[in-house]
Structure formats: structure tokens, C-alpha cells
Image (cartoon, rainbow, N blue to C red):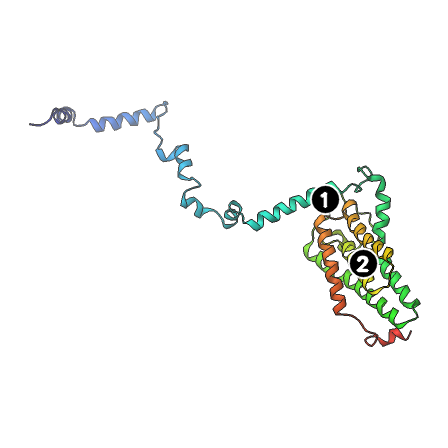
Amino acid sequence: MPSPRVTRAANANSTNPNNRFEFMSLLTNRTSSSEPVPTRHRLSDSPVHRKDSFNSSSPAFQQQLPEEDCMKLNPSFLEIALKSLLAIDLWLTKKLGVCAREGSSWGSARPLMKLVEISGHGIPWIGGTIYCFYKSDSNAGREVILNLLFALFLDLLLVAIVKGIVKRPRPMQNRMDMFATFSVDKYSFPSGHATRAAMVARFMLKHLVLAVPVRILVVLWAIVVSLSRVVLGRHNVTDVVFGFIMGHMQFTLVEHLWLSPNALPSLFKV
């Protein structure tokens, strides 16, 4: 016995076999009229479905990410450590730059710090070393002074090369009013004053006969010159720290490349 639902459907089809045609005609007439036809949004077109379909946790979404974005989302420990060190470096540089401007907290001490800056400049040291070389009477003294002059020129060369490679800009609070600057001095890393102070201090402590108070003054001079670079806002803290370490390494290099009187005999006959 057929079910009542099937029977009603068959009766409806038998009474109006063209019901599908009438429905299409009605839909066509309604579309041609001025009334808008309601449309049914597909589930895939809904904003919620689109958001779910591009969920960041899905494997397909992760495959579409570029490689550099994946590295940013999953930074390595080294990258986090370097960024943290850079943030601390910039913060300390800004806090310690108390003489960077006349209106800074210690702005009145800026002229004194600039005198300390000149005491560590390369031009006075090179000029004074050349003068002492030609005024020296002993060959042993000339040998020591000659190697100090060699160390000063080596310092200028190595610092210029590193600055040209790294090209780190100077701190924002710095004023370019330094004594006798060159084109490479617009870069900050490393501090040439710190390298020169560390190298010269070690050189003098080893090759010159100095009293204990003078030796202490030499060490204090190297430290004060290095600190003045941050206080004046010339360099970042890491520029000075690396420069101080680089100065010690340059002294070791000079010791290995020590120039003897036999290497340059004509100079010692002057």
C-alpha cells in the first residue's frame, strides 16, 4: 500500500504537470520587475566561514606564509637576545648621554669632556709621536716610538675599515662638532677613541718606565676617554665596549709585528 506522502505528491504532479514551468515563469517575471530578488548566501561566502577556512592554525595557511614571516613568528633565541641587547644598549646610551647637549643634565661639563675627547684624538698623538721620534737620541727610544707610531696608524686603518663595513649611525643626541673629523667618522661602530686609548695605555705600561702614580693616571685616562664617548653622546655603549676590546687586540697585533731598527735603517740614521 503506497504511503499518503507519495500519493499526495503524485496527485500534485497529475493535477499540474507544468508546475515547474510556472515557477520558472514566475521567477522570470519577478526578476524583470523593479523588486530585488533575494539571494541566498552560500555558507562558503559568509565572513565567519571565510575566517574559519583561513584559520592560522591550519596547515594550508602555514604553507602560504613566506619564509621570513615564519621566522618572525618563531624567532630564534639568538635573535631575541640580540634585539634585547640592542634595546638595552640604546636605553643606556640615552641615559648616560648627560653632556650630549648644553641643556642636558650635566651640560655645563661639556667643555671639559671635549678636552678629554681631544686628548684621545689621533692627530695630536701622531704629531706628538713624530716630534718625539726626531728628538730622541737613543736607538732604543726611537725603536719604541717608531712602533707606537706604527700602532697609531694601524689603529686608524682598522677602525676605518670596521666603520665602513658596519656603517652604524651615531646616536640621535650626538652633535657633529668633533675636532678634525673625516668622512668615515659619521659612523659610530666602533669608537676610535676607545681603541686608541686602550692600545696606547697598554703600550705605555709595557714599554715605558713609569712611576706607580703615573701608571695609575694612564689607566684612569684610558677609562675616562672611553666613558667620555658615551657621556658626550658620540657613541653607543656597545661601540665603546667593542672599541676597548679591539684596542687590546690591536696592541697584541703590534707586539707580533714589532718593527726592529734593522727593518728601517735609514730612519735611525737621521
Q: Position of residue 70 (x, y in %)?
A: 50, 47
Identify which residue is drawn at 78% across, 70% down: 258
- Is 125 placed above or below 6 here? below
The single residue placed furthest to the left in the displayed view is: 1
Q: Position of residue 12 (x, y in %)?
A: 15, 24
Crowding near pointer 1: few (<14 within 10 Å), some, many (20+)?
Answer: many
Determine the image quadrant of residue 2. Answer: top left
Q: Nearer the viewer, residue 61 or 29?
A: 61
Image quarter (top left, top right, bottom left or bottom right) of the N terminus: top left
Crowding near pointer 2: few (<14 within 10 Å), some, many (20+)?
Answer: many
Q: In the shown orientation, is residue 231 left or right of residue 35? A: right
Provide the secondary structure element on which disc 2 rests.
helix
State whether residue 255 appears in this view: yes
Provide the secondary structure element on which disc 1 rests.
helix
Q: Which residue is mark 1?
A: 93
- Is 130 placed above or below 90 here? below
The single residue placed furthest to the top in the displayed view is: 35
Image quarter (top left, top right, bottom left or bottom right) of the C terminus: bottom right
Determine the image quadrant of residue 104. Answer: top right
Q: Nearer the viewer, residue 207 or 127?
A: 207
Under mark 1, the amino acid is: Thr
Quote the CA–CA distance across marks 1 and 2: 25 Å
Under mark 2, the amino acid is: Ala
State whether residue 188 appears in this view: no
The single residue placed furthest to the front in the displayed view is: 212
Q: Earlier in the sequence, mark 1 or mark 2?
A: 1
Q: Which residue is mark 2?
A: 201
Q: Nearer the viewer, residue 160 or 263?
A: 263
Identify which residue is drawn at 82% across, 61% down: 205
Q: Position of residue 186 (x, y in %)?
A: 75, 51
Q: In the shown orientation, is residue 81 left or right of residue 166? A: left
